[in-house]
Amino acid sequence: MATPREGESIQIHSYKHNGHIHRVWDETIVLKGTNNIVIGGNDHTIVTESDGRTWITREPAICYFHAKQWFNVIGMLRTDGIYYYCNISSPFVYDQEALKYIDYDLDIKVFPDMSYILLDEDEYEQHSKKMHYPEVIDKILWRNVEHLIHLIRHRQGPFSPNFVNKWYKKYLAHRG
């Protein structure tokens, strides 16, 4: 597998289980790129939805992807603190076209006080039936929901104090 280089601008492509494109982030600057981890930063980047609609992100964000974990985390820097949006997803792959993953509907939103809510369980149930998620995938995904909640509660990994701020400073340095 190719590895994105630090300072490189890449796209992020999110797919659904059936292989259809879900969402594309036009530009993210790689802050760390290894075989296992990609950390990126973006701000006011164009996002294109599967139906062709576009929108622009409202605030700076630090994105954390892992090649062995079934989730990714976006830390959004807002005036009242850092909010996290966690996608339950396949591990990422990078193929020089883009960083790619499969979005499995379930999300966890984390607030600046580290309280959180699980989102889109109904969408997960609908897509699970419609796209025939295998039982083994279902078990992996729910195990990763529990793992994410553990990381949030213990402020570990991308939820550790200063994680987002540290990488945001690096992002600003790359932007010049």
Image (cartoon, rainbow, N blue to C red):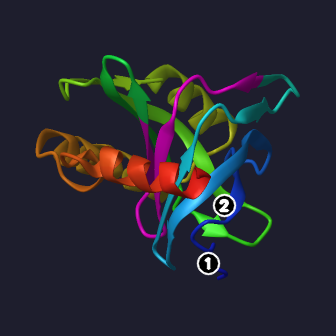
Q: Is residue 166 magenta?
A: no
Q: Which image quadrant: the N terminus? A: bottom right
Magenta-drawn segment:
55-75
Identify which residue is drawn at 67% across, 66% down: 8
Dot 1 lies on which element? Answer: loop
Q: Is residue 49 left or right of residue 90?
A: right
Decide whether the magenta segment is chiefly helix, strand or loop.
strand
Identify which residue is drawn at 51% across, 34% down: 60
Q: Earlier in the sequence, mark 2 or mark 1?
A: 1
Dot 2 lies on which element? Answer: strand
Outermost top residue: 80
Q: Is residue 155 visible?
A: yes
Foreground residue among 71 and 10 = 10
Q: Decide: few, some or many residues near mark 2? Use Cα within 10 Å; few <14, some 14-19, many ≥20.
A: many
| Residue 46 point in image, percent of width and height | 75, 33
Q: Name the amino acid type tagged 1.
A: Thr
Identify which residue is drawn at 73% across, 33% down: 47
Q: Is residue 48 left or right of residue 72?
A: right
Name above or below for residue 107 compared with residue 2: above
Quickly name the residue at label 1: 3
Q: Name the amino acid type tagged 2.
A: Leu
Say whether marks 2 and 1 touch (CB < 8 Å). Answer: no
Of the numbered discs in the image, which one, if any, rests on residue 87?
A: none
Name above or below for residue 128 compared with residue 102: above
Q: Is residue 7 left or right of residue 20?
A: left
Quickly name the residue at label 2: 99
Name above or below for residue 13 compared with residue 78: below
Identify which residue is drawn at 74% across, 48% down: 18
| Residue 173 point in image, percent of width and height | 50, 55
Cα distance in 3D space between marks 2 and 1: 9 Å
Foreground residue among 67 and 27 = 27
Quarter of the view holding residue 149: top left
